[in-house]
Amino acid sequence: MLDDILTPEERALVARAKAFAEEHVAPHAARWEWERRYPLETIQAGCRAGLNTIELAKDKGGQGLSFSAKLRAFEEIARHDFAFAFAMMNHHNAVARFARDGAPAHVARLLPRMIAGEVIGCAGLSEPGVGSDFGGLEMAAVKVDGGWKLNGAKAWITNAAVCGMSVIYAQTDKALGYRGIACFAIEADRPGFHREPPFELHGGHAIGVGGFRLVDYVVPDEALLHPPGRAFKAALAGINGARAYVAAMCCGMLQASLETAVRYTQQRRTFGQPVLDHQGVRWKLVDAATDLEAARLLSYRAARLIDEGADAVLPAAHAKKFATEMAVRRIADCIQAMGANGLRAEYPLARHLAGAKIAAYTDGSIEMMNERIGVALPQVFG
Ligand SMILES: Cc1cc2nc3c(=O)[nH]c(=O)nc-3n(C[C@H](O)[C@H](O)[C@H](O)COP(=O)(O)OP(=O)(O)OC[C@H]3O[C@@H](n4cnc5c(N)ncnc54)[C@H](O)[C@@H]3O)c2cc1C
């Protein structure tokens, strides 16, 4: 479907991402979860394979490919592990954002190390007390001579376990509300950066999600990516893409779950016939296949609109809402069809179920998607 509009170079990238995931992710993902660890060495292997430079402009050392190509590549990776795909994607996004918005001298110093995977990037909006309503964030930024002084905490940040660079949002003037928010590129090796231990997250240890505190952390002026008045808008500009690719990642997880369940129920027999031939089981998997088709169409449509520069707010919200909800329900149905064996760790289904549940929060929860769609109801249907 979406592959039809990709260039040959982009289709080759998707094939490379698929091969990378089969070789480097599939055999290890369950172990990362048992060992409760962040697979830094595989993230770095992903960097060497170009999984962090897909959208980065060619003159900055990237591949200059489309958003749709990136989405398809990461759908393939998420077939094997959502957590790894999400962590790798967040690093990619930090690379691309920093390269685009950073001060030239800062970018020249740091970007090559981020491309090489020596410095891992992340994005920090959420805080211990602030999630959905991120316009109310509390990290404070105060202007000082030659730079800014930052104080406050970030939480629930993907890649925080190892990040060397973070694109963070901080409030410069509470009275201005969301218009007072500014965006900075900060580095973890400067005084005042205190990393918290990563969170224990069922099914998501490879995301390396956690937080850090900034205590009288001073950044030079060059670290300001977006001044107050522009940062909040810049954060929202990237969110449609995130919603579309999270939806595609859910499709990848359900694709793998269906393949596993169909193969299993074809060979497992009860009451004298393959389990798949019992209508009660078959129709459940049929419903899952139909939902997968619909979720793919929604996420691919949002991706195409993003590449065309068209308004993708509602398509991305519909895609994320539908795909995350259906993935939780349908991956559980695939497990059910396999009986108790569906729960065994040799199959990826239980891990994918946890991944789908995690996906339902990242980059805006299902309720926030409803709020977004709800605000537009009068325009669309009124
Ligand atoms: C694995 C993982 C990785 C993440 N990575 C990042 C990251 O890299 N960077 C980052 O900044 N953040 C990240 N997040 C945070 C994520 O964006 C938040 O979890 C999300 O915004 C929801 O916020 P919350 O969890 O604090 O829920 P809350 O905002 O506390 O909301 C609690 C519940 O109430 C619902 N709710 C809230 N307001 C309303 C309303 N008005 N109407 C109806 N329902 C409502 C929510 O949908 C949710 O179900 C990550 C989260 C996870 C789980």
Image (cartoon, rainbow, N blue to C red):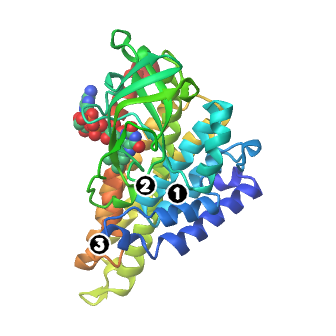
State whether label 1 is within 8 Å of ligand 1: no
| Residue type highlighted by circle 2 | Cys
The percent coordinates of residue 344 (x first, y second) are 28, 77
Circles 3, 2 touching at the beta carbon (< 8 Å): no
In the displayed structure image, the side of residue 76 where residue 328 appears, left or right: left
Q: Is residue 368 visible?
A: yes
Q: Which residue is mark 3?
A: 337
Q: Nearer the viewer, residue 275 or 176?
A: 176
| Residue type highlighted by circle 1 | Glu
Q: Which residue is mark 2?
A: 250
Residue 75: assigned label: 1
Circles 3, 1 touching at the beta carbon (< 8 Å): no
Q: Nearer the viewer, mark 3 or mark 1?
A: 1
Circles 2, 1 touching at the beta carbon (< 8 Å): no
Establish if 202 lies above or below 110. Answer: below
Q: Secondary structure at mark 2?
A: helix
